[in-house]
């Protein structure tokens, strides 16, 4: 992890991803890029219908100033922590915020974004674009996050599928630094696991990378898979979740699968995703 990018939020109260990204950059002695959007990308097209041009100009000016304030906080935080950094203020683009961030994210090892908050910034589309359109992993930071990067225990959600394998591989820089890495098998679905002892082969693979491994298998009761994972993560005081990002195509665009969407809605620890 040598080159990271974080999406900056306008309001200082929403700087959880910024603070977490700084701690990740410190841990890996990495370059950190911050990008803030001063355009109308965060507003749905229907909300702009009928708005006078003068009002749109005022909204644009406010967004630009808020984005510049976010850049200033980013520059101050990275300078204070003596990091290598660069900042980008995006004002006018032919693409939406989500597509623009995804295009930028392709040039970095990892994208870091804040979780969508019911009464705060909606990053859902940007998270999806970063996950499906960058070819790079993503960390989503909970909006309740207060602590910097901590790697005492990482929980890897394992189902034997390709996205999970990609996530584990992409997360190796974190896994190698972790105190304990736990392979969590959540059973109860109809996945085909013939020829594989649950989690054993991937555990052996990680052990050859000098990663300290534990294996746990959990049956799914009447609760959802996401609730089972999140409850277990809380019980084990996990510092990070690692999981494959699942989705399906809809009119050439990807949308998040149910478990991935539910995790990102209710998550309470930083979640590392790959596709």
Image: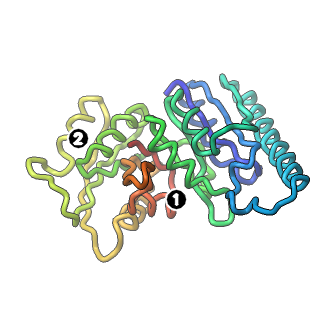
Question: Of label 2 and label 1, which has the lower sequence position?
Answer: 2
Total residue callouts: 2
- Local secondary structure at mark 2: helix
Above or below residue 244? Residue 5 is: above
In this view of the protein, can residue 236 be seen by the observer?
no
In the image, what residue occupies the spot 19% across and 63% down? 190
Among the 4 quarters of the image, the one containing residue 73: top right
213 with respect to 39 (left or right): left
Question: For the view shown, which residue lies furthest in the left direction?
Answer: 195
Residue for badge 2: 202
Q: Which quadrant does the C terminus fall into?
A: top left
Q: Residue 112 at what x, y percent from top left? A: 56, 41
Looking at the picture, tell me which residue is in the foreground, 219 or 238. 219
Mark 2, Cα crowd under 10 Å, few <14 / some 14-19 / many 20+, is many
Residue at the extreme bottom of the image, as rendered = 222
Mark 2 vs mark 1, CA separation in Å:
26 Å
Check disc 1 and report its element: helix, strand or loop: loop
Left or right: residue 254 compared with residue 33 = left
Whether residue 43 is visible, yes or no, is yes
44 left or right, relative to 136:
right
Residue at image location 24% in from the left, 58% down from the top: 217
Q: How does the figure colour the protein chain or chains?
A: rainbow
- Seen from the viewer's position, the closer of residues 250 and 34 is 250
Label 1 Cα crowd, 10 Å radius (few <14 / some 14-19 / many 20+)? many
| Residue 38: percent from left, percent from top | 76, 43
Which residue is the extreme one toward the right? 54
Q: Quadrant of residue 92?
A: top right
Residue under label 1: 268
- Seen at 18% across and 41% down, the residue is 201
Q: Residue at x 63, y 36 (%)?
A: 22
Instruction: Give how far across and how far down residue 118 sits, in percent.
Output: 63, 66
């Amino acid at each position: 992890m040598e080159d990271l990018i974080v999406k900056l939020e306008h309001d200082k109260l929403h700087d959880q991803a910024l603070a977490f990204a700084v701690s990740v950059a410190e841990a890996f002695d990495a370059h950190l890029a911050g990008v803030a959007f001063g355009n109308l990308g965060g507003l749905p097209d229907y909300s702009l219908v009928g708005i006078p041009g003068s009002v749109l100009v005022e909204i644009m000016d406010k967004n630009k100033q808020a984005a510049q304030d976010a850049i200033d906080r980013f520059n101050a935080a990275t300078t204070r922590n003596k990091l290598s950094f660069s900042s980008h203020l995006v004002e006018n683009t032919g693409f939406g915020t989500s597509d623009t961030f995804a295009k930028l994210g392709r040039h970095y090892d990892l994208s870091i974004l804040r979780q969508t908050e019911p009464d705060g910034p909606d990053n859902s589309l940007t998270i999806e674009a970063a996950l499906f359109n960058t070819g790079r992993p993503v960390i989503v930071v909970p909006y309740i996050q207060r602590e910097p990067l901590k790697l005492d225990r990482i929980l890897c959600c394992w189902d034997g599928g390709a996205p999970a394998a990609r996530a584990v591989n992409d997360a190796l820089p974190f896994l190698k630094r972790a105190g304990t890495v736990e392979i969590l098998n959540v059973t109860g679905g109809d996945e085909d696991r013939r020829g594989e002892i649950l989690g054993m082969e991937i555990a052996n693979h990680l052990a050859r990378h000098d990663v300290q491994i534990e294996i746990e298998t959990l049956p799914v009761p009447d609760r959802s898979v996401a609730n089972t994972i999140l409850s277990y993560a809380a019980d084990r005081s996990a510092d990070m979740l690692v999981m494959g990002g699942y989705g399906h195509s809809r009119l050439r665009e990807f949308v998040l699968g149910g478990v991935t969407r539910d995790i990102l809605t209710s998550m309470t620890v930083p979640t590392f995703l790959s596709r």
